[in-house]
Image (tube, rainbow, N blue to C red):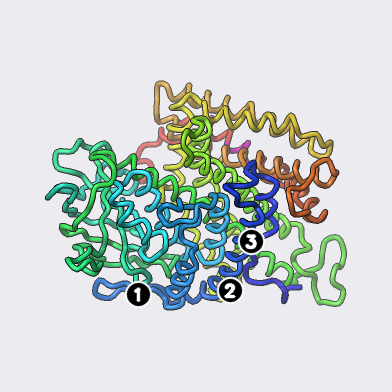
Amino acid sequence: MAEQLPEYRVPLKDMQFLLNEMSDDQGTDGVTNEDLFFILEQAARFAEEELVPINQDGDTNGCVFDNGKVTLPAKLRDAFRTYAEGGWMGLSMPEQFGGQGLPERLSTLVGEILTSANHSFSMTPALTMSASRAIIGHGSDELKETYLEKLLTGTWTGTMCLTEAHCGSDLGLIRTSAEEVSESVYRIKGNKIFISSGQHDAADNIVHLVLARLKDAPKGIKGLSLFLVPAKLKNKAGVWNKKNEVHCIGIEEKMGMHANPTCSMSFEGAEGYLIGKPNRGINAMFTMMNEMRLGASLQGIGLSERSFQKSLQYAVERTQMRSLGGVKAPEKEADPIIVHPDVRRMLLTQKVLAEGGRAMAQFCADLLDESHKPGADKERVELLGLLTPIAKGFLTDTGLASADLAIQMYGGHGFIKETGAEQLFRDGRASTLYEGTTGIQALDLLGRKVLANQGKSLLSFTKLMHVLSKKTSSEKLGDLADTLSGYSKEWPQLAKQVGSKAIGDFEEVGAASYDFLMYSGYVSLAYFWLKMANVAQELLDGTRHPNGETFDRDFLDAKVKNARFYFERILPRARAHKEMMLAGKASIMDITESQLIG
């Protein structure tokens, strides 16, 4: 059996289940789920045949910096060109700009596949599409006409240049300056750090989206503007080979993602063009940032899936001790470790986090599709806003936990580079940091997305939880429905309790925010697990007609069993986070700095 398990196999059956049975959208502009699944199969083939085999090579060889030039590992560079030339870059982007206009629920699944197969590879396409979305949403017609087609075909790639050495998430401290030199043309001066794909040799040009401050602009984030700064400009003959004053001055040596360059960039009077209005750069930037946060959540899901498959491969192969319930493999000196309860616990934890997170991402993708349409429902847009920090913060945290379990599964061998288990953890660690750390997501969720709007978006989600609990008719799932119903009432009450404490002391929000985020994540996934289990049980009982593909009973029965595992073994973690969020700030803040130092 172990010989037959591949390094990574795209979970196509689970993805097809989500497309067919879990989405309200069963067709977009004449594109059916069958069409989407056919495309998904091609993405799976590319990932399994092209990206997985070069993953360890990229980790070993990494990127090379030499006199301002960055060279990617040759196999990764070639794979990117194959990917771009295959038309994969602009899957969900508007056709008018060179995209394919396909739904986000397809590109979300493809994004997960890429990060599972090769985390370093996935970074450049994701950043380029996020930059493109900002240009689509806020750029002038001229900028759209000039840059979008090149970006959406992968001829050029994009970045987001926000962070500076003295300011991480505190963007109000940005010092990069912009000076208008003629109508619509600006000179950008300053340095940026941690710029993923800031310089490389896989594209003809790199388009940087740079946050900078105009002269006499207001202080803080209200004085920031967003600029498009290409690495190359068009010369008088109309050829894009004129060097702009954009320089890569070094790349970071990181613990993971060695095949994706993290660059320090210097803008030395570089020519740039305003995106949107002056001093409204944060508005434009958040279009890009929110896309990236949802993209980072896919990295968490992909990490859980890849960690599960890595662990499963070892669990069926490795023999250690005999089963506590009696010998399972008498022809061997010991039983495969998959028979041991604690190994099953780790495998199932990884599996339910991956599949639950995937269902959540599909729901967010449907909301994202709705938000792109004219006259989008405000409540649904706000619901997406609520779920974005939960998806980013919770799913990357649990993805990292899944990678940690993979190392534990391998024991001492998990600590050895040869097995590849440790690379999963090293590559995945960054997903909890960029686009705002878990702590930043937690503050955004509790402060801006819940308390700032009196919990309206939270109530819209708990209403969905309540409705699902009431309509779950199967006796086999009744106890799970009752549990979810209880959380649908408790979650808004907890937000009120924390909010009441915060009225006179904002530090109470900071003290409660991380545990509120984790509680929200566990409860959110419970909703998606009950929804999946309910659909699976109805298909098993014959009370629901399948939307296309008929799923085998073993797959459906596993969905129900996995839901029960989630509710009994994972969801109870929410109770501990509840206790901690309500404990208040005293035990955190009462100790003095000198006492911390000792």
Amino acid type, label 3: Phe
In magenta, the rendered stretch is: 573-577
Mark 1 in CB contact with mark 3 (< 8 angstroms): no
How crowded is the residue under tag 2: few (<14 C-alpha within 10 Å), some, or many (20+)? few
The residue identified by callout 3 is: 38
The answer to whether any part of residue 453 appears in the image is yes
**First along the sequence among labels 2 and 3:** 3
The residue identified by callout 1 is: 71
Amino acid type, label 2: Glu
Q: Residue at x 48, y 37 (%)?
A: 385
Q: Position of residue 413 (x, y in %)?
A: 61, 72
Amino acid type, label 1: Thr
Q: Residue at x 31, y 51 (%)?
A: 162
Of the numbered discs in the image, which one, if any, rests on residue 37?
Answer: none
In the image, 259 versus 506, the foreground residue is 259
In whole angstroms, how far apart are the C-alphas of marks 2 and 3? 17 Å
